[in-house]
Image: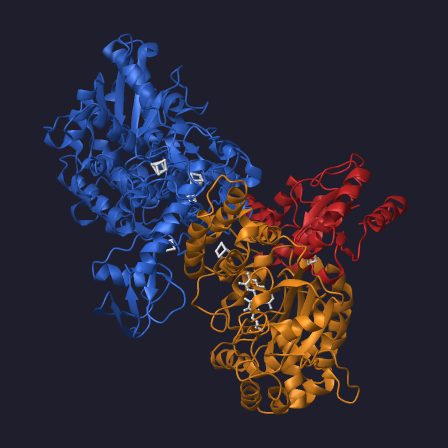
Amino acid sequence: MLTTEALVKELVEKNGKTRNSLMPVLQGIVQKEHYLSEEALLSVARELDLSAADVYGTASFYTFLDTVPRGKNIIRVCKTITCHMKGKDEVIKVLSNALKVKVGETTHDKKFTLLTANCLGWCHKGPVMLVNDEIYPDLTPQKALEIIEEYAKEEKKA
Amino acid sequence: MENNLKKVDIIFEIDDKCTPLDVVVKTLKRPADEIILDLIDSGLKGRGGAGFPTGLKWKFARNEDSDVKYVICNADEGEPGTFKDREILDRVPEKIFTGMAICGYVVGAKEGYIYLRGEYNFLLKPLTKKLEEYNLFLKKNNIDFNIYLKSGSGAYVCGEESALFESMEGKRGEPRNKPPYPTVAGYNSKPTVINNVETLVYTTMICRIGPEKFRELGTKDSRGSKVFSVSGDTPVPGIYELELGMPLHEFVNEFGDGDVKAVQVGGASGHCVPRKKFNDTIIGFEGIPTGGSMMIFNSSRSMYNVLHDYLEFFAEESCGQCTPCRVGCQQLLKGIEAVKKGERSPAYLDDLKKLTGTMKIAAKCGLGQSVGNPFNSIIDNFREEIIY
Amino acid sequence: MSKYLVNLKINNMPIAVEEGTTILEAAKKLNFRVPTLCNHPDLTVAGNCRVCVVEVKGARLLAAACATPVSEGMEVFTNSEKVRVSRKHIVELLLSEHNADCTKCFKNGHCELQDLASEYRIGDHVFLDLVKPESKIQDISSPSIVKDDSKCIRCQRCVRTCTELQGVSALAVINKGDHQKISTFLNKPLHEVVCTNCGQCINRCPTGALTERNYIEEVWNAIYNPSKFVVVQTAPATRIALGEDLGIQVGERVTGKMVAALKKLGFNKVLDTDFTADLTIMEEGTELLTRLKRALVDKDETVVLPMMTSCSPGWIKFQEHMYPELLDNLSTCKSPQQMFGAVAKTYYADKINIKAQDMIVVSIMPCVAKKFECERPEMRDSGYQDVDYVLTTRELAMMIKQAGIDFDKLEDEHYDSILGESTGAAVIFGATGGVMEAALRTAYEIVTGREVPFTNLNIKPVRGMEGIKEASIKIKNVKPEWSFLEGVELNVAIAHGLANARALMEKVKKGEAAYHFIEIMGCPGGCLGGGGQPIPTSPEIRKKRAEAIYSEDAEMTIRKSHENPEVAEIYSEFLGEPLGHKSHDLLHTHYKPRKRY
Ligand SMILES: Cc1cc2nc3c(=O)[nH]c(=O)nc-3n(C[C@H](O)[C@H](O)[C@H](O)COP(=O)(O)O)c2cc1C
Ligand code: SF4
Ligand code: SF4
Ligand code: SF4
Ligand code: SF4
Ligand code: FES
Ligand code: FES
């Protein structure tokens, strides 16, 4: 595994040393490390010659650029209207029970974080959830559980 | 029951004899002004929500004097209830690329960007691959245009064009003051054409089938067809390309579950139409325009919950910079909660309606300006459900 | 190229203005005042508060007057029904997320939000109270600044100030939607981040969300304490601005009245930081000449040039964070306020027979960074904290009001002696370029025995509000002991406002600048635009204050630091010589690198 600093350097190298690269650089870090640590934010600020507050302010605008530690697998259950109508509450409930976390929390083994999200663009197949970048439509509580179990079993990488 | 609803197959149609690659090569041999005339003639209006005539937009950008210009495809599709752009990106991406390349030729841009919402990251890999092939094809044909992919990170407001530019520039997605408009100063403050995914596909198709074929469909104010995202209480949820200008009752007959109480036309920021108005509501720019979202609610649904969901969405997704929207959205949300709990009298709903009047004309961007649409249409038609 | 004229009507009155003018500016020309909150003459346009909305005939939306350029044939209404209703709604909304306990608020009576609220007679709470309890926890970690989020209206003026004027960006907008707020890196307390304590954000905050840490009560307590001997020093730039907070016109000097008021408040001695400004020139001028000698004669390669001034504590902290590699360029001289404290609790205490531990030194400063500076551990060379309390010009005005003093009617009085004598050179410390001008007046004369070759000693090239100024003076016909400077072209540069400082430092770092001496003031305009000066501020206000400073200088009988008789006295009686042993102990200091990230 690359150190955070090396990872940032690599991403900056790839995307260019300008402000316009900020989003891809932050996205690249989240992909590898699941969230933006203080160290990561500071490295980015240093490499792109931006103020740390500015980098933090920008990251905090975006739901997917988390600045608090997240598990290896981030679950985002859609909470918007059609998924609401089709039973997202039940899905959240079983996941929450199975993982023993509330929405917003991360499991002790750091394997899962359970979050909700606004409309994911699969309303015709609600309820849906994202696990990392994978989409799982047409959920039932049972299906959701099975999917999570797969991730737990496989130790599937983010 | 008789039904005139016309299903159309333009967007997803595959014609091996004339592929998007053939279209771009052929079209780029024509004079740019002619292409613009065709687009204007077709009557195509933007499919991203605002409905600006596409031909005019391209013309404005073409007329700008600048070495650097950009073409941007808005694939930030975040309006609740909308999922048609994802389907287009998945199934016919070359048609989008072709629309962008034609636009680049017409306005004099050499770079195109697709801004893909972070929620669609699973599309990054296949799209990247197809883009590489497409870019290579352009290069081989000596077409000086290259398309890049950028992704968002979960912010609905970044679908607003100027917020999208800010985001691409590595900043918070806060909408800008207008003027200047994108065709004058957009991405990197250069003249920029920004179009919705679907709009770009129609430009490709108009170049292929000609403007006449396109304008045969639809009505005077709403030419052509459009892709609808149908969800909610329907036995057949999904994506449908339909002729514009249909009365809502025809739509409900086709897609409803027989017990439809209301249809939310145009997503969370659109209008809620109750059953009694189905007959005289036209779907199109002369009636209720929509980016394609049609959410159907049957009589088992609480319209309080519907409105509450929408308002929560806006309170969270407002960029937060301007007063009417940042504070207004929270007041509307907390306000209906207070009325529901009896902490405020029902008459408070009228104060809130007046507030949406201010949001509509004083908010900085389309997000804050349109929150009043769902609020007023739901309060006006389902007041009891909100209060009791 | 001349710009087009655009014809429009505002409230039915025709006007023609240059293309690119905003509706707000055009309305002002016709004497229609449109209220604003996020707009500020020193900053780029934001267009986010929306209180400036106006109606444009035929438009679906209201236009933000501050952000909308005029166009041909436009018909604008600044007070139509739609406008009034919307504007009132907007103020009501702002108040609904605002902790409006005005009576407890430091900004009470000087608050732009309060003004609007009372103008629009916002009565009972129309909307629900949205103030978040956690927003009421103030950040008082900084000795200079208090941040109170429950009073913030998110106009982002502070953020733009910190970025555009100061190049620091310690503050940023964070989160979105209902969680959006103004904060620091990872919401750390202000004293842990790169904030320089310059206070420029305070000067531009329309509400009480950013204010100085005030020490008024502490100072009253000291005054009332019979066992304490309380001396007060006043910085150069206070005398040309204090009046603004006491009903006197911008640009009017109130030196004599200020002294009279301070005496009435009960300070035991009223003394002048100008005295130590002159002392600074002696020390800093000598330091510069010494560095030049070592570089040119001794060919000593360890000598660091250009030398940079060190009297602005905001600038010092900036340099410690941002350019720690350039710390050796800084003059080792303390700021005049700290020189004063060190001298007051040693030389002066002895002279007037007061024990240092019984003496309280209060500073009246145009600056909030000096509150931080006086608490620095390096600033205790007298054996005690050299300066005990720093009050801003604004806080002094408040004390004067509290004491019921009718400022306008005061008869001029003189500073006490000693440590009360000053020169024109010291007075101009308050304006950008002033330290440079004062230093040149003295250094040139030391080296050549002649006055600087400028009419009436006015070194015009170093004056004015340009962000970065450059000048060079050819040194000719020097005294024999300075022969190594014969024919040397002395290159100097001046920057004010930390964004300009930053640009200059980048030049220095890249080696693009062959300067010998650089003056930097942390605040736009220099101390006259300091973070502790009366609010509001604008380019025009600062221009008027600068004029006041230069006219004060012009009227002084002594205008060169080395001619200050009290300065000569302190050297002969106490310090010995500039850069001597005592000076080294009391008047000089060192700096420490701080984290940028
Ligand atoms: C809050 C907000 C969100 C928007 N989201 C989208 C979007 O996701 N996709 C889109 O194409 N247009 C969106 N728009 C509209 C765009 O600002 C812009 O008008 C559109 O991309 C122009 O393309 P068109 O002319 O092809 O419709 C949004 C507008 C607002 C105010
Ligand atoms: S209307 Fe809302 S989203 Fe648009 S600029 Fe204002 S706060 Fe931001
Ligand atoms: S900031 Fe202004 S309105 Fe708010 S409490 Fe202070 S004086 Fe009152
Ligand atoms: S005091 Fe100066 S550096 Fe600190 S936040 Fe305010 S403007 Fe920025
Ligand atoms: S702290 Fe003051 S200047 Fe900054 S956004 Fe809040 S109200 Fe505006
Ligand atoms: S509402 Fe859940 S995907 Fe759209
Ligand atoms: S002053 Fe114009 S929007 Fe704030």
Q: Colour of chain A?
A: red
Residue C583, placed above or below residue C487: above
- Residue B52 point in image, percent of width and height: 52, 75
Pick the quarter of the image with the N terminus of chain C: bottom left
Which is more toward the observer, C241 or B285?
B285
- Residue C121 point in image, percent of width and height: 29, 44
Which is more toward the observer, C63 or B130?
C63
Residue B307, placed above or below residue B241: above
Chain represented in blue: C
Q: Is residue B91 found left or right of C253 in the rendered image?
A: right
- Residue B151 point in image, percent of width and height: 66, 61
Residue C405, placed above or below residue C355: below
Which is more toward the observer, C373 or C509?
C373
Q: At x 30% / y 59%, what residue is drawn?
A: C81
Pick the quarter of the image with the C terminus of chain C: top right
Residue C80 quadrant:
bottom left
Q: Is residue C270 found left or right of A107 in the rendered image?
A: left
Question: Whereabouts is ligand 1, in terms of quadrant?
Answer: bottom right
Q: Colour of chain B?
A: orange
Q: Is residue C418 visible?
A: no
Which is more toward the observer, C67 or C54?
C54
- Residue C534 point in image, percent of width and height: 28, 38
Q: At x 70% / y 81%, what residue is drawn?
A: B8
